[in-house]
Amino acid sequence: MNLFSESNLSPDILKAVGELGFETPTEIQKQTIPFILTDTRDMIALAQTGTGKTAAFSLPILDMIDEASRKIQLLVLCPTRELCLQIAKDIKNYSKYMPNLKSTAVYGGSSITDQIRSLREKPQIIIGTPGRVIDMINRKALDFSEIQWLVLDEADEMLSMGFKDDLETIMRETPETKQTFLFSATMNKEVERISKNYLTNPHRIAVGSINEVKKNIKHEFYVVGYRNKKEALKRLIDANPNQYSIIFCRTRMETQEIADFLMQNGYAADALHGDLSQAQRDTVMKKFRLKNINLLVATDVAARGLDVDSLTHVIHFSLPDDPEVFVHRSGRTGRAGKDGISISLIKPEESRKLKQIKQSTKIDIVEKKVPTGDAIIKAQVAGVFEKLFTIHEDFFEFDDKMIPDLSEFTKEELMHKMLQVQLRDMALYYKDKNDLADQAFSRDRDDNGRGDRRDRDRNDKGRDRDRDDRPRFGDRDRGERPARARRSNENMVRFFFNLGKKDNLKKVDMLDIINKATAKSKKRPDIGDIEILEKFSFFEVEKSYQNEVVSNLASMKFKGKEMRAEVAAK
Ligand code: AMP
């Protein structure tokens, strides 16, 4: 089967798949589609996200499912809410021309009563996370006694997240006669054990190389010592303007640390990792999808739930141990016919690890030097022009009369001035530290790679403000939780807030909103500058409250209007 049209799938499915632009089945689909359509055995497939595994099991099952019956026939279990929603969306797309087919996603972190209500549609397919499925079984809302197919998706992940008992409980609720398909990225002892106990004589499928190495991705690596890593990251971000990237880290702590570093330095960045609540993760992913932030710092596991096609770069802040993970991470860019760049930061002692990755993936990873300040400014200028020619929308009402008489300047002189204004801060930052290897610079900077002129200015201003005895907003009587006198800027994060004077927002309202958004915390946050502008506002809050403010504001309203706070861009 080299083309979908050569498979035995029904015309309704082929039509839907064709409209999605799928012509040739992926490696795993070539193996699973004929097998599932004709065989009654269980199956174990070694495959990761990105191999087309969702279509690999759902297309043949959709082909065989009984649309006329209102019984649940397929149960798909997967580890996270994001994956659950992704699979549900894919199945909806594949079954676009099956009018009587219904599927429902059930997952934690969302109202169980709403989900139970949606079961009134009598879906033939349930896609769920183990915990929520058990809750539903306990409430007698779900009955799996007649299912024909059980899919365990990302089984290794479900087991490592501690869902073993839940999986076993659910499997006991399903009939012996069903067919079970287990998908896993890795085959570890736990997965083997569960397969042995719950699958009968399974047919095994492994997709050759789990991740296809894409030719349209350029791979670069930069050797930097531990102390300079963050500064090198900053330089690589500055040298690649207009980027939309995921920065991969190894641990949750490192992820948060790097995201904090970028946010403190004024980048539109945020962190995605397992220590965040579901609501926080959702908010971050939404911001990234909507491009409110352009840099997402993530762990491998947390990034799995995110499906975006237009990444310009993938940055490996830390190298993974497994070469497959390197290929998988890099494959997040260069999608949908675009080119992509994968950037790796390598500590000198990691050269062996890099060699291993190069050897086993056969990827040509080219060494480059961390850009100098001069090169960065050049790239920034090019970035301004790139933006100039790609922006086609107006963000404010423009009137020619706003432009004063400029006849004494040539267009080059004008461009020169505009670029100086635009790139002033960046140029000042790199002025005395053109080269990362510059010793003078290394001595000057603190561990955060800050200590530059801009920050010194800012800190001085902060100290001046602290010496200032005038009453502050926090000194006003605002009930039980008055804001405390503000500290210097370095502990603060500056937010963009979507409401302003036109919404009748006053400073005192802003304080009230911040206090409400942080009401659950034991300690009151420090609140810094509040600037209420016509259409939107800015405010500063102590850094450690950042996630709380963003996620809580998203569910609050001011005079009936939805509120949204984002870390302000540079
Ligand atoms: P998955 O591994 O199921 O997460 O799928 C990865 C991505 O590949 C999804 O965006 C699918 O829509 C897409 N995809 C799946 N099968 C094909 C195919 N045969 N041709 C092109 N794209 C596909």
Image (spheres, rainbow, N blue to C red):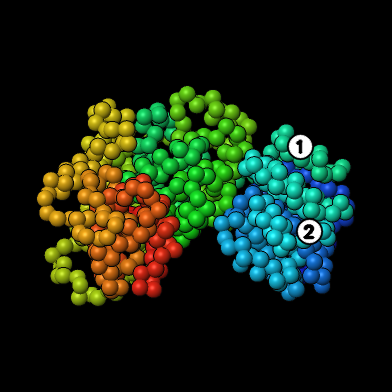
| Element class at badge 2 | loop
| Along the viewing direction, whichever of 360 and 245 lies nearer the viewer | 245
Q: Decide which of tag 2 and tag 1 comes sooner along the chain.
A: 2
Which residue does the image show at 60% across and 46% down from the upper left? 214
265 shown above or below 54: above
Front one among 27 and 504 = 504
Residue 395: where, in percent of width, then height?
33, 69
Q: Is residue 170 left or right of residue 330?
A: right
Secondary structure of the residue carrying tag 1 is: helix
Q: Which residue is mark 1?
A: 192
Q: Quadrant of residue 58?
A: bottom right
- Number of numbered markers: 2
Residue beneath disc 2: 144
Task: Say which of 469 and 425 sits in front.
Answer: 469
Residue 90 is at least partly visible in this image = no
Q: Is residue 226 left or right of residue 411?
A: right
| Left-right relation of 254 to 215 | left
Question: Quarter of the image holding residue 437?
Answer: top left
Q: What amino acid type should be assigned to the residue bearing mark 1?
A: Glu
Q: Amino acid at mark 2?
A: Phe
Q: Which mark is residue 205?
A: none
Q: Residue at x 45, y 38 (%)?
A: 253
Q: Residue at x 50, y 26 (%)?
A: 350
Give residue 59's position: percent from left, percent from top: 76, 60
